[in-house]
Amino acid sequence: MPQSSGLVVQGLTKTYANGVQALQGVDLAVPSGLYGLLGPNGAGKSTLMRTLATLQTPDRGKIRLDGVDVLADPDYLRLRLGYLPQQLGAYPGVNARDLLERFAWLKGRVNRRERRAEVELLLEKVNLTAAAARPVATYSGGMLRRFGIAMALIGSPRLLIVDEPTAGLDPSERNRFHRVLADVASEAVVLLSTHIVEDVENLCRRLAILADGRIVAEGTPGALADKLAGRLWSRIIPRGEAVPEAVHLSAAPDGTLAVVEADAPPGEGYAPHRPRLEDAYHAVLAAAGVTEVAG
């Protein structure tokens, strides 16, 4: 793969009019394939996604797609972009098939037969063929999310940005969407922004962790987890017993599962804990001074 291929972000900074510094010198190099962006709510993920999608301009920094400066030439990226934001609206009274055809035409699919074939394929991919004649405004939350996925895939995008994509999807829909993403990633740069660690761990070869507008860690899921090898211990804390300071805490049938980082077992009942990406994620945020992680 040529060095210029993929998405390259350098020194991206964004401060809003209210003084909130949403991005603080973000650097990323994202090759073709699935790349995860993890972070709690308020970390700057949505700001970064909107900036990469050219929906807003940064104060400073550079964005290049396959070597092209897209801040100087935003239309180059827009013709090659698929974007699924957190919130998706719909035009009243317009059905899914007609709306997808309209977007396909706007993306340059001027041949009617080819455009209709692409729309039908996308409707099938997201399991909306049976509901394609219904107005999108009547869709449930999960159906609207699937429609947004189809819309983002129009035109076989070179860069696909998906922001919290599995929100509102049931387990079967979520698995279907994961398969669609994996197919697209064979030929495109797919940036998956989420706070659901499992999605990134299962799908992405590499990821970055964003906190307070900064990249605080980057690497493969395995490499980030391996940094904690031999240093994690876990124990079920019974209900009513004081909960210790921990890398992270999670609910368990008999109380709270506490995962603690230490050189040796921190007390009676602690067993070695095999690190996973979730453990690395919480440890990195704690080291960065992020004490409250929004779920």
Image: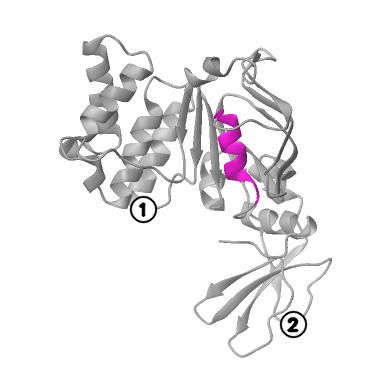
Say what secondary structure mark 1 lies in. helix
**The magenta segment:** 43-54
The quadrant holding residue 178 is: top left
Q: Nearer the viewer, residue 234 or 99?
A: 99
Residue 197 percent location from the top left of the image: 56, 52
Instruction: Specify which label sits upstream in the sequence, 2 or 1.
Output: 1
- Secondary structure mainly formed by the magenta segment: helix
Q: Quadrant of the C terminus?
A: bottom right
Above or below residue 132? Residue 31 is above
Please name the amino acid that badge 1 sits on: Pro
The quadrant holding residue 279 is: bottom right
From the image, tell me which residue sits under label 2.
268
Q: CA distance from mark 2 to mark 1?
A: 38 Å
Q: Is residue 144 visible?
A: yes
Residue 243 percent location from the top left of the image: 68, 81
- Do tag 2 and tag 1 residues touch (Cβ < 8 Å)? no
Residue 16 percent location from the top left of the image: 67, 44
Q: Residue at x 64, y 46 (%)?
A: 44
Please give the label number shown on residue 171.
1
Q: Nearer the viewer, residue 23 or 4?
A: 23
Q: Quadrant of the N terminus?
A: top right
- Tell me: 129 left or right of 47: left
